[in-house]
Image (spheres, rainbow, N blue to C red):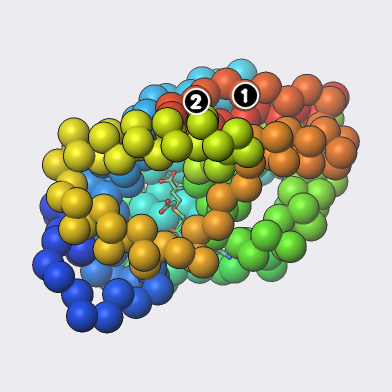
Amino acid sequence: MARSNGRDRVFSKPLSDVRAFEFNETVANVFHDMISRSVPGYSLLLRMIGLYADIFAQPGSLVFDLGCSLGEASLVIADQTRNIDCQVVAVDNSQAMIDKCRQHRDAGGSIEWRCEDIRQTSIENASMVVLNLTLQFLPPAQRKGLLARIYTGLNPGGVLVLSEKVVFTDATESDRMTQLYLGFKKTMGYSDLEISQKRNALEDVLVPDSAELHYDRLKAIGFDEVYQCFRGFNFVSYLAIKA
Ligand code: GEK
């Protein structure tokens, strides 16, 4: 698989001015390492997405990977559905990410890579939609609208996979999860400086919702079954099924 294998050192040197985080070429070049060392259970999440594709992808349908970054989930889905006549549509609004995805073309012949804002993506005839750590980057007020469009565009029996960083309403749980997540990042080789500079860069860029809000919103939109299938500290993943 064509992949960027650089080590993430984006925040390793003291920065006089920590700018808002962007998915630019510098980040795209090291993104596999960055996300693998920053999201507890990232590789398991990808395996779970493959399993869902195996169970839920329908012949003749579309499978959307919204905010695909380097296309890791898309490649897993394409591999899992290679014997099913379905089309994977992978969307990201970072040109740097999509340029790298297009290098995967040989590996994933059935993937359509689109540089597009997911708020503009028309969702229809979908058996599966993946928002793996993407919704958290949309302005909070626009999240329900996108989820509702996804629900409308899903075929009966279709699923949404929603993975997110979350915040906690209980102060004790919030402090404990922050402590554990900090510890996790250190075990993954990040320094205190890297952790704090990245946290500053993500302020107002990655705005997490609470787990309760996610669950209630998915149910309010109409999803018939909503399951939290994964949790790693302050990261969760839901499987939301349209009957
Ligand atoms: C994975 N899903 O490896 N339109 C399109 N793309 C967007 C938008 C938008 N409005 N906002 C953010 N993005 C991937 C990981 S990363 C998660 C997803 C992270 C894109 C953004 O460019 C980036 O590539 C991705 O969403 C979020 O399974 O970095 O924590």
Q: Is residue 202 visible?
A: yes
Residue 167 lies in quadrant: top right
> Residue at position x 84%, y 26% from top?
224
Residue 119 lies in quadrant: bottom right
Horizontal and vertical percent for residue 81? 52, 29
> Is there a contact, CB below 8 Å, between mark 1 and mark 2?
yes
Q: Relative to 220, is 99 on the left or the right?
A: left
Where's the N terminus, which quadrant? top left
Horizontal and vertical percent for residue 104? 32, 51
Q: Relative to 177, is 83 on the left or the right?
A: right
Q: What residue type is labelled 2?
A: Arg
Mark 2, Cα crowd under 10 Å, few <14 / some 14-19 / many 20+, is: some
Q: What residue type is labelled 1?
A: Gln
- Quote the CA–CA distance across marks 1 and 2: 7 Å
**Which residue, as the protein is rendered here, is positioned at the far front?**
172
> Residue at position x 64%, y 65% from top?
139
User: How many discs mark residues in the rendered view?
Assistant: 2
Residue annotated with mark 2: 231
> Residue at position x 19%, y 51% from top?
192
> Residue at position x 85%, y 41% from top?
221
Query: Vertically, is 10 above or below 190?
Result: below
**Which residue, as the protein is rendered here, is positioned at the far bottom?**
17
Residue annotated with mark 1: 228
Q: Is residue 78 visible?
A: no
Query: Vertically, is 156 above or below 103?
Result: above
Dot 2 falls on a residue whose secondary structure is strand
Dot 1 falls on a residue whose secondary structure is strand
